[in-house]
Amino acid sequence: MPTRIVHLPVSYLFRRLPSRLWVITLSLALTVAMAAIAAVGVGPAAAATAPVGLGTAGSFAVLAGSTVTNTGPSVINGDLGVSPGTSITGFPPGLVNGTQHSADAVALQAQKDLTIAYNDAARRAPTATVTADLGGQTLVAGVYTGTTLSLTGTLTLDARGNPNAVFIFQSAKTLITASASRIVLINGANPCNVFFQVGSSATLGTNSVFVGTILALTSITANTGATVAGRLLARNGAVTLDSNTITRPNCSVASTTSTSTTSTSPTSTTSTSPTSTTSRAVPGSGAPHTGEPGSVNPLNALIALGLLAAGAGLALRFRGQPGKN
């Protein structure tokens, strides 16, 4: 007698399961979906912007290519230097709480590192294009680019609780801030991680409040009473000051390999009233952060929710009439 093979539908098998097993089945489906969410659904939405490494230029509050000229009682909290130019004038009456470097090996190396940093910032892929006037905006971490940049009123930079948030602004031409304009940092934003790469020259308005490091190809002018929590670094031209306060943020300075360099006319002068410039590690000056805490990858979340829906739907679809316990 030939053997008969009976093919039973899957729904028949489900209908024969005791009711207690249905509870177990549904619980397992929920557990698998929850595990998927925990394993792959929660995490960085995208890699965050890495900070711009300044090398030895990071110890400078002011660095110029041709000259540094000061008028009035400016205060420079950090090193002051020029290279390949040699002229530093206006100190006194200006005060340097740091070391002056005029065309010496330190200033030369700082200019080399500034060139590397400038090119790095200029080559970053933009995450957004901004209008000329940054005033009245609140921006999160990213790389912002524009043909020219200006600031009237207040620009707010929001780190959203991430101390590693990095803000990079790229201007193909100029950066000009208006009188009494200001930059405000909120929710953990750090002046160590704010950079303005300027393709020509930068001008800071009278009594303006600026935050961040300016990397200018040509020159930088700070008008009367402007204050900077950051750095004014000019590659080829002059830095011109007028009764300003420039305070280098206390960030960790990247180490560089020591090389033998000879300067024809080295000059190194230390201020009579230096303040402590001991570096400390600051979040955002090391390895780049991988994303905002608690952010969710939409694709992974969709997959996890699909697993959850499939498990629940399967249990409800084939339950039918449960068998006897």
Image (cartoon, rainbow, N blue to C red):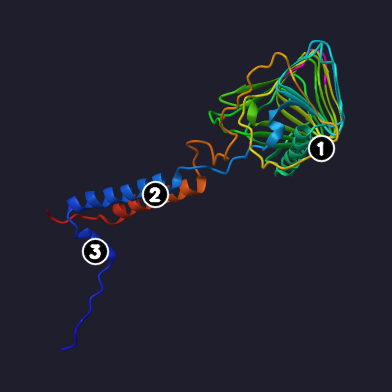
Mark 2 belongs to which amino acid? Ala
How far across and down, in percent of the image, does residue 62 sit?
Answer: 76, 25
Picture quadrant where residue 108 is located = top right
Residue tagged by mark 2? 36
Q: Earlier in the sequence, mark 3 or mark 2?
A: 3
The residues colored magenta run: 222-228
Badge 2: few (under 14), some or many (20 or more) residues near its Cα, within 10 Å?
Answer: some
At numbered mark 3, what does the secondary structure look like: helix, strand or loop? helix
Above or below, comparing residue 323 to residue 231 in the picture: below
For the residue pair 114 and 18, the one nearer the viewer reads as 114
Would you say the residues marked 1 and 2 are in contact, meaning their CB atoms lie under 8 Å apart? no
Left or right of 71 in this view: 165: left
Mark 1 belongs to which amino acid? Ala
Q: Earlier in the sequence, mark 1 or mark 2?
A: 2
For the residue pair 92 and 212, the one nearer the viewer reads as 92
How far across and down, in percent of the image, does residue 57 sit?
Answer: 72, 33
* Magenta run includes residue 224: yes
Mark 3 belongs to which amino acid? Tyr
How far across and down, in percent of the image, does residue 258 sit?
Answer: 68, 41
The alpha-carbon separation of the residues under discs 3 and 1 comes to 70 Å
Camera-near label (3 vs 2) is 2
For the residue pair 49 and 76, the one nearer the viewer reads as 76
At numbered mark 2, what does the secondary structure look like: helix, strand or loop? helix
Camera-near label (1 vs 2) is 1
Residue tagged by mark 3? 12
For the residue pair 62 and 203, the one nearer the viewer reads as 62
